[in-house]
Amino acid sequence: MTDTSILLKAYRLMHQAKLMAETYEANRPVCKYVHSTSRGHEAIQLAAAFQLQPQDFFSPYYRDESMLLGAGFSPYELMLQLLAKGDDIFTGGREYYAHANYRGNDKPTIIHQSSATGMQAIPTTGIAQGIRYWEKVDIEKLKRGPGNELPVVLCSFGDASITEGEVSEAMQFAVLHQLPIIYLVQDNNWGISVTASEARAMNAYEFASGFKGMNRVQVDGSDFNASFNTMKEVVDTVRKERKPFIVHATVPLLGHHTSGVRKEFYRTEEDLAAHAKTDPRVLLREELLKAGIIEEQLLQIEDSAAQLVSTGFAKAMAAPDPSPATVEDHVFVPTPVTEEKGEREPSGAQKVLMVDAALFAIRELMEDHPEALLYGQDVGRRLGGVFREAATLAEKFGDHRVFNTAIQEAYIVGSTVGLNAVGLKPMVEVQFADYIYPGLNQLVTEISKSCYLTCGKFPVSTILRVPTGAYGGGGPYHSGSVETTLLSVKGIKVVYPSNAADMKGLMKAAYYDGNPVVMLEHKGLYWSKVPGTEDAKTMEPSRDYIVPLGKGRIVEHAQERAVDNGESCVVITYGMGIYWAKAAAKQMNGRVEIIDLRTLFPLDEELIFERVKAHGKCLVLTEEQQRNSFAEALAGRISKACFKYLDAPVEVLGALNVPAVAMNMGLEQAMLPNTEKLKTALEGLLRF
């Protein structure tokens, strides 16, 4: 039998949760933002929360308000988020109810929580990955409990989320590396209006049996005593033995799916009555009475809860809304890198390939920063990357800092969130741009929104390396360009170096930036194997060389006489486009200036607009398929900002609008821009 004081605490919080749900329902016009409550799930949620200590981490899902109450958050604090108030301690009015995040010394840490079902599995497993790393490398980096206890990680789900692929990727990594994480699955038999029997062939407990090394247990999640004892045993075991567990808890669903998707829309009276029979609050109240707690004491608890909820709701309603002036705050954390420093061409330096410049930059970063990690497919020992872009790094820094992963792009990308939360700075790689799409869920849902939706508490400082671009018959799944897709994602930065010096300087800046940065690296420039790309090899810059993000560079100047006479134009481009532009400019008698953007976001609009105004004629060049591309969007922006200075329409040259790069090299060349196509376009532009 659980200690009576714990049972009474659980009952107090369960009654608070009941009254909160009733208050929201009675005030629907005020509680206008969509929300879910924990009714039916209270016992297992409180049982889990009561085991956690301040050094721990947990990721609740959208129905986990009782877990948050159990962790020590007040009804008033939760109601501020319910009503999207400016004083909402979690997100300042930016997130849904029970989407907490928290960083403090008095409660467990909670990273950014999204609404996408199951997506939290990967970032939360990334926390456990980071904890395991520090255990092996420097255990003093980990915060301990009052009895010197190590941290554990709890990841909570609804049962319907278990069918998501990201959940499998996370569990695969957890069992492979035996991480100290508990996956708590709350199974109420419903996924909105879809029943368990319609959606899956097995429950989470049965599903977990396929993961060798996953410890598992089932519990009646409506029974607080059983839930408390089970969670205590599991948490104690993970805290001591450092291995993964899944807890499958069956629970009733007593409330609506959400305030908008209501139970009467799709559930029968018989189903609702069956679920009501296992109401955790009612069951616990009966148990307390049987244990000798008098009715008067329970009524006193209920009256006290009613006063707390009523007062909290009135106070929350009176709280101010967030100021509209703050809507753009916290998209990024401020970067410390604001100006170019170091020597770009130091005396006595040797020319290096672009692929080696990246390698040297990462090597220097890892020498200077023990918190820096590098991982992805084939980047570890033996191969060192399919382009040898990580060669020798595992040998130098060890397999714990440079290592291979499985083919699981979502995990590679999303785990960086969790690693950041424990003080690590990951650099990761997706092997080809064409394979970034499985990782977009994590990039968009978790990484890009984390800083903004936590009001700056959890920025994700990471580099995502993405080899990109077409050359030499790479074919439809190894030649794609993805910058427009990436640039549609707000909350990330996108860099695209075209030479070795910029590769090294931008890689350093990306590491220190403090925000998520995608490094697009053209495969055809890595080794300067494509004819005309010899200039991608440059002198290796000094160790301290750094190029701030958002600064373009003029790589070719037009003759002053041509500019003064209105006979010149400027080509704005990046990546392989630099070399098509250089080759074409050689045939244009000094009439072409070339700007290398270097960073696609943030964009150096100041330089772009200044040079377009100076020339009056402009062409934006891209390797991407032209229609609806970043290049076309940039051309539109230039047209608006520089309209009074233009002597001709802003031109765009990109690849043909076909869905893939064909394997045959003749077809590949027919699709892509090249020097001759650009020369023809420039001749037409200069005739204006």
Image (cartoon, grey):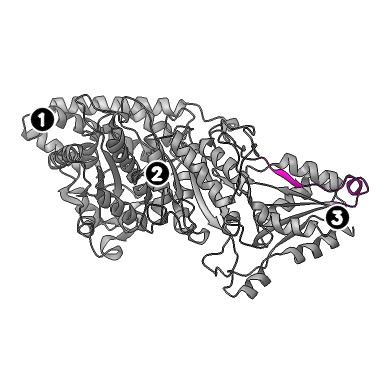
Residue assigned mark 3: 648
Q: Which sits earlier in the primary sequence, circle 3 or circle 1?
A: 1
Residue 357, image x and y in percent? 56, 46
In which quadrant of the rendered image does the C terminus lie? bottom right
Amino acid type at circle 2 is Lys
Q: Nearer the viewer, residue 651 or 21?
A: 651
Amino acid type of disc 1? Answer: Asp
Identify the disc placed on residue 396.
Answer: 2
Query: In the rendered structure, does residue 252 fall within the stretch colored magenta?
Result: no
Residue drawn at point x = 61 percent, y = 41 percent: 349
Which residue does the numbered mark 1 point to in the structure image?
3
Q: CA distance from mark 3 to mark 2?
A: 55 Å
Image location (x, y in percent) of residue 501: 62, 44
- Tell whether position 554 is magenta: yes
User: What residue range appears in magenta?
Assistant: 550-568
Q: Quadrant of the N terminus?
A: top left
Number of residues whose C-alpha sits closer than 10 Å to that of mark 1, classed few (under 14), some (14–19) or many (20 or more): few
For mark 2, give the secondary structure. helix
Residue 215, percent from left and from top: 18, 50
Q: Nearer the viewer, residue 45 or 584?
A: 584
